[in-house]
Image (cartoon, rainbow, N blue to C red):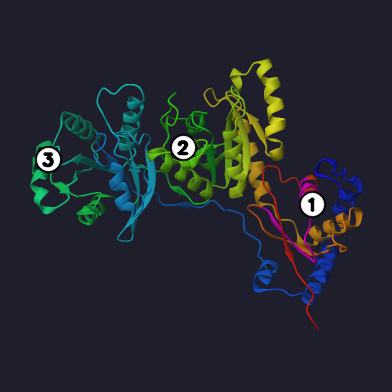
Amino acid sequence: MPDDDEFPELNPELADRLAALDEETAAQRASTLRAGLDDYELDDEDLGILDAATDDSDAITYLPALPVLAIVGRPNVGKSALVNRILGRREAVVQDTPGVTRDRVNYKAEWNERRFTIVDTGGWEPDAKGINASVAAQAEIAIDLADAVLFVVDAMVGPTSTDEHVVRMLRSTKKPVILVANKVDDARQEPEAASLWSLGLGQPWAVSAVHGRGVADLLDHVLTVLPEVSAVAKDQVGGPRRVALLGRPNVGKSSLLNRSAGEERVVVNELAGTTRDPVDEQIELGGKVWTFVDTAGIRRRMHLAQGADFYASLRTSAALEKAEVAVVLIDVTEPISEQDVRIIELVLESGRALVLAFNKWDLLDDERRRYLEREIEQDLGHVSWAPRVNISAKTGRHLEKLVPALELALQSWDTRIPTGKFNALLAELTAEHPHPVRGGKQPRILFGTQASSRPPTFVLFTTGFLDPQYRRFITRRLRELYGFEGSPINVNMRVRERRKR
């Protein structure tokens, strides 16, 4: 068996023979090989793999739009803590520092068998400047796109001039507003909430987001205000493909999401680490609906991150697990770093399809381009199968090339090879390049099947352990014959012995 660097070139005649092979003949041969496995010790998991069913492709279905509840208030009054209490899990990033939440972030919630969408927002302040102005703008957009609003006030502080500014803004929207007096941790503190009647929004609902006190009564009231079907939200799309935008901090993920959505959907700022929570956005791009997930930038080592950054890293990993394809953005104006490679490794470990987006291409000069090509060859050679797009998220340059790359990667990720064709390929490969003899024995491949797609996972039933080089040889042939651009391929083994007579 040759070394990895000396793989024999694909024999064109092999591709022609496989293409000409009759499906029925290939299936009959595979059936014969499958019958031969009955002579070997097989467990329940083996039988489950052999009987694996074909996955159906995603169909896009439209569901009624869930009513939307926006949660607003000035910084550090406990909005994200209230979101977590309603959801029943620690989803929104919470920290004792004001300004942790920056974007408007959607979560699906349920209470008394009714589902609705919660929108967590950053703290609203009048006359905000810099990044705080962007945060305030996102909060105002959230109110416009909501059916009702929870206005959260710190009952222990009482009404402030900022709260009165927010009240004036809320009144101008004509949306139903529910006043929440947070941080009322016990009955002795309830009189503190009475001062909030002065805001003119009716009864203040006294709650403790941290301890859960009063939240059930608040939600019962919320359901009387929310409509059954949202008057402002788009119909839910049941089957759009989920795209995670990954990269180190400040590489342009939020700019790409905003440019794709055609609106300022998330806060963009030169300050690294602006995004803390994953932000889902359904957008139409290239004539299709996609769910883009903007994530926090992954720093060099997750265990070195602290506070909000640590939880943001955890949520980024969770967003990747829920996605189908990852777009890893790389800043071409800087050398490819260990962080970039580590992020790609995270995608490979998760088994998601992969597209490499080289961002800020409009800032690239000829000298940097030469160095970049060398870096790609040296540092990203192990993912040479991933589609590459050269874009500028800020200007929108070549953004149209992203959709064909996503479609190609997802098509590969979904691909299934018929069992007959796969076994015919294995027979050709083992005849042309047999596995080397190890310890006086030569392992044989008895049967192969694609156990699953998403990602394509192949299982080989063998009489002995196959060298890693030989498995890479099989993987390379699969790519040469069937493409699989943009998708990782898993080739697993199950070594089995003959039944004792």
Q: Is residue 155 above or below residue 500?
A: above
Residue displayed at 28% across by 50% down: 226
- Mark 1 or 2 closer to N-term? 2
CA neighbours of label 1 inside 10 A, class few (<14), some (14 to 19), many (20+): some
Q: CA distance from mark 2 to mark 3?
A: 36 Å
CA neighbours of label 2 inside 10 A, class few (<14), some (14 to 19), many (20+): many
Q: Which residues are magenta?
A: 456-479
Q: Please tell me whether mark 2 or mark 3 is closer to you in this view.
A: 2
Residue displayed at 33% across by 25% down: 133
Left or right of residue 379, residue 193 in this image = left
Left or right of residue 339, residue 139 in this image = left
Q: Is residue 250 above or below residue 16?
A: above
The residue tagged 2 is 296
- Mark 3 or 1 closer to N-term? 3
* Residue 218 at x, y percent in the picture: 21, 52
Which element is circle 1 on? helix
Which element is circle 2 on? loop
Left or right of residue 43, residue 118 in this image = left
Q: CA distance from mark 3 to mark 1?
A: 70 Å
* Residue 164 at x, y percent in the picture: 16, 31
Q: CA distance from mark 1 to mark 2?
A: 37 Å
Q: Is residue 70 visible?
A: no
Q: Nearer the viewer, residue 381 or 303?
A: 303
- Mark 2 or 3 closer to N-term? 3
Left or right of residue 347, residue 451 in this image = right
The residue tagged 1 is 474
Residue displayed at 83% across by 45% down: 3
